[in-house]
């Protein structure tokens, strides 16, 4: 089991993780450090437990806000998916009209042929 040293709020901590999980642990520690660093800068020296607690609470607050937003977006997506799909009106030409147009076209071609013969 790999042991890593991570720094949170300017303090080093030895932490173990599963093989292959080192990147995730470093990422999580960096997120916690991003919350702890401003606390240490503003308040100064804090007991380790209080610094970690406050940083964890700040991170949890951000996570809760993201989860709320995700829930809202999922509800909107479900609402959009539940709507009936927009349909397009496709004109249906009755066969009688098609036959009539074909007949008119045939007559027009015949007239054009007669005009060409006379010319």
Image (cartoon, grey):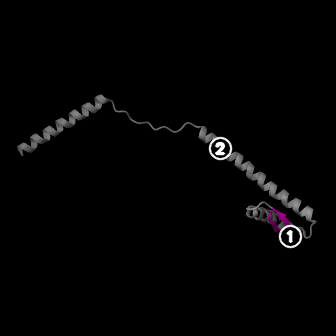
Magenta segment: 1-16
Q: Main secondary structure of the magenta part?
A: strand
Query: Which numbered marker is on residue 4?
Result: none
* Above or below 94: residue 15: below
Instruction: Please state, as top left, top right, bottom left or bottom right, where the N terminus lies in the image.
Output: bottom right
In the image, residue 55 lies in the stretch drawn in magenta: no
Mark 2 element type = helix
Residue 76 is tagged as 2
For this orientation, the residue located farthest to the front is 1
What residue does disc 1 label? Answer: 12
Q: Is residue 27 above or below residue 68?
A: below
Q: Residues within 10 Å of mark 1 (few under 14, many from 20)?
A: few
Q: Position of residue 45 (x, y in %)?
A: 92, 70
Q: Looking at the image, do the residues carrying marks 2 and 1 touch, with CB atoms under 8 Å apart?
A: no
Viewer-proximal residue among 90 and 119:
90
Q: Residue at x 92, y 62 (%)?
A: 49
Q: Nearer the viewer, residue 90 or 78?
A: 78
Q: Residue at x 81, y 67 (%)?
A: 4
Which residue appears farthest toward the left when viewing the image? 118
| Of callouts 2 and 1, the N-terminal one | 1
Residue 5 is one of the magenta-drawn residues: yes
């Amino acid at each position: 089991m790999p042991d890593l040293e991570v720094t949170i709020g300017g303090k080093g901590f030895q932490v173990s993780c599963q093989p292959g999980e080192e990147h995730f642990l470093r990422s999580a520690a960096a997120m916690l450090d991003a919350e702890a660093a401003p606390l240490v800068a503003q308040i100064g020296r804090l007991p380790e437990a209080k610094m970690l607690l406050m940083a964890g609470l700040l991170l949890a607050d951000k996570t809760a806000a993201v989860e709320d937003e995700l829930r809202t977006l999922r509800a909107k997506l479900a609402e959009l998916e539940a709507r009936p799909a927009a349909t397009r009106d496709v004109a249906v030409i009755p066969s009688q009209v098609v036959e009539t147009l074909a007949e008119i076209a045939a007559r027009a071609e015949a007239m054009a042929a007669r005009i060409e013969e006379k010319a």
